[in-house]
Image (spheres, grey):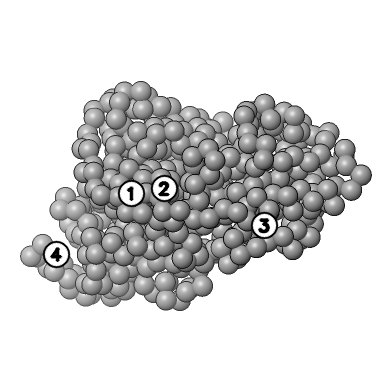
Amino acid sequence: MKYIKIHNSDSVAVAVENLKKGETVSVDGSELVLASDIPAGHKFALCDIAEGENIIKYAYPIGRADREIKKGEHIHTHNIKSNLSELLSYEYTPDFTELEKIPSRTFRGYVRADGKVGIRNEIWIIPTVGCVNSIVCEIERQAQIYKTENIDGIFAYNHPYGCSQLGGDMQMTFKYLCGLINHPNAASVLVVGLGCENGNIGELKKVLGDYDENRVKFLVAQDSEDEIADGVNIIKELAEAADTCRRDECSAGELIIGLKCGGSDGFSGITANPLLGSLSDRIIGMGGSTILTEVPEMFGAETILMNRCRSRAEFDKTVDLINDFKKYFMRYGEKVDENPSPGNKEGGITTLEDKSLGCTQKGGTAPVEDVLLYGEAVKRKGLSLLQAPGNDLVASNALAASGAQLILFTTGRGTPFGCPVPTAKISSNSVMANRKRSWIDFNAGALLENKTMNELTDEFLDFVLALASGEVKAKSELLDKHELAIFKDGVTL
């Protein structure tokens, strides 16, 4: 396979391998001669395209030609412009079908006292403010003596926020931290505050609401004569309880999976992202839930999601989700199409529409059941959209705070990072998967070789259930995951 034409109506094809100028390729029964070299993952024109005419990929416009483009020419940043504009009005025209219910598979998870299910049995130490980062790290170091075979890890997390935040930032920090405190992957949580910060424990508790006093403990460093010794003693108590937890057989309908992409390339929207979409439909068909985020990478594909909203209420919330994020850009004088990244472009992605139409495929075909604000927990089964930016660390942390027990992260360029929950990397191409074996957990590039989507989804589902059961670990779990990334949109004093 030298190229892929994704949809019958497309005016471009994507090179699967490096193609040479002057090479003849046969498309839809007719031959064309390539006018230039076409790198793997990049596009070439299947017909003459007039200046100003839309260029079609995935059956949708990915921009318009900014000069005449001849059949066989390379289409990239030098000859295409985005069609994106600022705030738009939308009309709700529902266009979705119900997913078929399928028999649920099972995994072995931890059923918590509140009924939530975790896939790891960890103890988390969470600071309310960056001033105590060194304290929580030392508590973590000394508390390792209390880790047992039944405890997957004792982890302290760091972040620079929790004080001097204005413009709603403090509430966003509270919501994010409370999402982690309530997360079922943590058997127990120690929250450490300084005492004088804006985001002190008393204020945090107002956002947290009811909590299990046996599971969540608090420590104010300024009120303690030896906060490290006190913290270690609290971890000893929490570890004794966590050590009694055991895995039980759970329905896959209890899974909440975060869907994320980063370092995308020209194959991401052809292999890895559609594979996540297929997996998402399977999980939802079994009664589970998935979360799609990266709002700026919905721009240009938003109407597809809007028309999949189950009701007018979800449609209205999706319109606000898109336009509010555009307003965020505009407040800072930024263009709404300030994307793709240099790595995306090198890999073959040309415009934000090109990126978005590939990115949103991670959400499969399920109806949109809910739209969540940043830090808000999943409330409904099925597919939810989440308010968060495209930044890999911030978006992945947002998915975790909303309750995702694991994150499936597609990449065409490769990335090693992790966040508080297992973050499995799915490669879009075999070359990168083979080169970065220490980063990549699953290779969707097999779709360009000899695997069908159904076959690979079967294999992928087996992997995800094994990951959820603790039979395998994500490669990122073997690396450092101590830094939290919190969304910020306000003034720091």
Give the class, few, some or many, for how many residues have Cα within 10 Å of label 4's Cα (few <14, many ≥20): few
Give the class, few, some or many, for how many residues have Cα within 10 Å of label 2's Cα (few <14, many ≥20): many
Of the two numbered discs 4 and 3 on the same chain, state the one appearing first in sequence. 4
Of the two numbered discs 4 and 2 on the same chain, state the one appearing first in sequence. 4
Q: Quadrant of residue 147?
A: bottom right
Quarter in which the N terminus is drawn: bottom left
Of the two numbered discs 1 and 3 on the same chain, state the one appearing first in sequence. 3
* Gap between marks 1 and 3 measured at Cα: 30 Å
Mark 1: which secondary structure? Answer: helix
Asked whether residue 184 appears in the rendered view, the answer is: yes
Residue under label 1: 283
Mark 2: which secondary structure? Answer: loop
Residue under label 2: 255
Picture coordinates of residue 137 (x, y %)? 76, 55
Mark 4: which secondary structure? Answer: strand
Find residue 27 and name its label. 4
Mark 1 or mark 3, whichever is nearer to me: 3
* Gap between marks 4 and 2 measured at Cα: 42 Å
Asked if marks 3 and 2 touch (Cβ < 8 Å), the reply is: no
Residue sitting at x 28%, y 41%: 366
**Residue nearest the viewer, comparing 439 with 257:** 257
Picture coordinates of residue 274 (x, y %)? 30, 55
* Gap between marks 4 and 3 measured at Cα: 56 Å
Residue sitting at x 9%, y 65%: 30
Mark 4 or mark 1, whichever is nearer to me: 1
Q: Name the kind of residue labelled 1 in the image.
A: Ile
Mark 3: which secondary structure? Answer: strand
Q: Name the kind of residue labelled 2 in the image.
A: Leu
**Residue nearest the viewer, comparing 463 with 430:** 463
Residue under label 3: 154
Asked whether residue 360 appears in the rendered view, the answer is: no
